Image (spheres, rainbow, N blue to C red):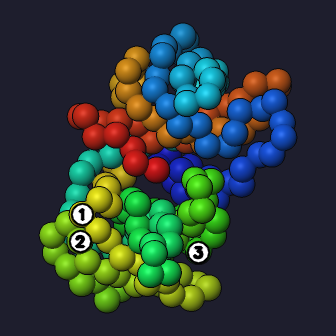
Amino acid sequence: MKIGLLALTLVLGVSTATAQPPPRVRGVIQSVEGQTLVVKTQDNTVRLTLTDMTGINGVEKRTMADIADNTFVGATAVKNRDGRWEATEVHIFPESMRGAGEGHYAWDLPESTMTNGAATGVVGKGRGGTMTVRHAGGNVEIDVTRRTAIVALTMGSRALLVPGATVMALAQPANGGAVAVAIIAESNGVKPPM
């Protein structure tokens, strides 16, 4: 299942001091030229090769009310001024992706971590609250605020890869370029917050 490709690649590390595109490419699609996706990032333009194995996911908006006890989630978080983990975004995995990238580890956004695991002790049903994310290595308590973007990953297709759409792609260097392993694409105006 292509949605699983994203799960397998969410833990790719950040490349350092290379001319290759970073493992995570965030930006806006400029064009799709055959098997090449051209993405304008904050710093440059990146060309990614699409293959039959490129997993494509969409996103849909959700709220805390959609996070029940034992829902498998991923949360990007930073420390707030009180030293607590505060989610900048939470993505809800489909049940078929339970276990994807499970753990608590550094993420490639400034001073951030990613925690993937089962949500427990969920408090709050609107736009804010707290949850404990349980993973094989332990538990992390995370605050969810009104500013936290909450989305669910959905099945997607190449139909989502259109000029102007915001994407977050996971790439691997190959033959002097980069291959898109998995892509999370804007869906119905909802942009991937990762």
Q: Is residue 81 above or below residue 187?
A: below
- Quarter of the rendering containing residue 133: bottom left
Residue at the disc numbered 2? 128
Cα distance between the residues tagged 3 and 2: 23 Å
Q: Amino acid type of disc 3?
A: Gly
Closer mark to the observer between disc 1 and disc 3:
1
The secondary element bearing badge 1 is classed as strand
Q: Is residue 32 above or below residue 71?
A: above
Please state the horizontal and vertical placement of residue 4, each as a whole percent of the image. Answer: 52, 53
Instruction: Note whether 89 is above or below 193 in the view shown.
Output: below
Q: Amino acid at mark 1?
A: Arg
Identify the residue shown where x is 84% and y is 40%: 17
Is 57 on the left or on the right of 188, as rendered?
Answer: right
Name the residue that disc number 1 marks.
146
Q: Amino acid at mark 2?
A: Gly
Residue sitting at 32 percent across and 61 percent down? 148
Label 2 element class = loop
* Label 3, residues with CA under 10 Å away: few <14, some 14-19, many ≥20: many
Residue under label 3: 103
| Vertical relation: 101 (above or below) 132 | above
For residue 104, side relative to residue 13 (left or right): left
Q: Which residue reaches farthest front? A: 81
Spatial CA span between label 2 and label 1? 5 Å
Q: Are marks 2 and 1 in contact (CB under 8 Å)?
A: yes
Mark nearer the viewer, 3 or 2: 2
- Of callouts 3 and 2, which one flags the residue occurring earlier in the amino acid sequence? 3
